[in-house]
Amino acid sequence: MKHSYIIALLVLIQVMLSDKLTAQNLDFGVVAGLPSYSGDLSPQELGIYFEDIRVGGGVFLRNQYSKRLGIRYGLTYGRISSSAPLRGANGYRPNFLTDLYEVSALAEITPFTIGYYDAGTIITPYLALGLALFQFDPKTEFQGERIRLQPLGTEGQGLPGYSAPYRRLQVSMPVGIGLKFVVQDKWTIGAEIVGRKTFTDHLDDRSGATVVFGDVVQGNGELSGRLSNENLQPVPENFERTYQRGGEYDDWYYFSAITISYRFQSSDTIYKPGKKGVICPRF
């Protein structure tokens, strides 16, 4: 799935670029966003939940090859977390948070534009598709301390019969929609929502893996056991208990964002001057 997506995206970009590969219409911009998370600690595994929205931001460089296609390269930071309800035998709250650091390349594909250049503002809806590399490091609050979860192996990672520790550097596939307002080919103000399909189920340190409580406690330590299953005490009578800490789906994260950019280098006028008249779609 991942490889076919990459191939299809590269082919699409190549077709749309055609003979415009030498164009240099460069925008520098900033993005202010509201990152959120969807995973095993969400009310449902897939969805956007307002109680889990945090803040983030970044910068980007966009090469606008034509009015149909721009390629945006970005550096983005955001924090995601979950506000799960209080649960567990000891009143343990299985929340998590992680800082995300992302580098991405997004194709902004515009099927049509609305308005005329002479009117001063062009409206451009777009579809965003791309690839991203991100780093995460899930943590939780336990007994007044913030604890990193990945080194603990809360699902038996690193033990015989279990998977290796998951990697904190992962690939995601951004996909979303947006709307831009282009003012005289220089300033662009936009709004977008872009979800990131990840290939890890460990943003929150939880997956659908089957765990034997005694393996975790005896192999990775009592703290790992306590954080693996908050409902079990690390005593021998619980060592045979098996469970799954999460569901079957990989995790997602999202950015709902406002973007502002300025064209500091231009080799061509992207939105050609047109006839004055009633604003309408330009295909």
Image: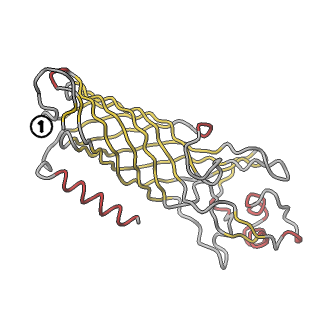
When the figure is inspected, residue 258 is found, relative to residue 80, above or below; the finding is above
| Extreme residue toward the bottom, this view | 160
When the figure is inspected, residue 47 is found, relative to residue 183, above or below; the finding is below
Residue at 20% in and 21% down: 120
Task: State the image quarter where residue 121 is shown.
Answer: top left
218 and 173: which is toward the camera: 173
The x, y position of residue 181, in whole percent, is 29, 28
Q: Disc 1 marks which amino acid?
A: Ser
The x, y position of residue 118, in whole percent, is 15, 22
Residue 103 in the figure: left or right of residue 187: right
Q: Quadrant of the C terminus?
A: top left
Residue 44 in the figure: left or right of residue 224: left
Residue at 65% in and 57% down: 149
Residue at 44% in and 33% down: 32
Residue 270 in the figure: left or right of residue 189: left
Task: State the image quarter where residue 15 is shown.
Answer: bottom left
Query: What count of labels does the image hold?
Result: 1
The x, y position of residue 263, in whole percent, is 23, 32
The x, y position of residue 251, in whole percent, is 55, 55
When the figure is inspected, residue 259 is found, relative to residue 148, above or below; the finding is above
Residue at 24% in and 54% down: 13
When the figure is inspected, residue 116 is found, relative to residue 51, above or below; the finding is above
Colouring used for the render: secondary structure
Describe the element under mark 1 as helix, strand or loop: loop
120 and 145: which is toward the camera: 120
- Circle 1 residue: 267
101 and 203: which is toward the camera: 203
Mark 1, Cα crowd under 10 Å, few <14 / some 14-19 / many 20+, is few
Q: Quadrant of the N terminus?
A: bottom left
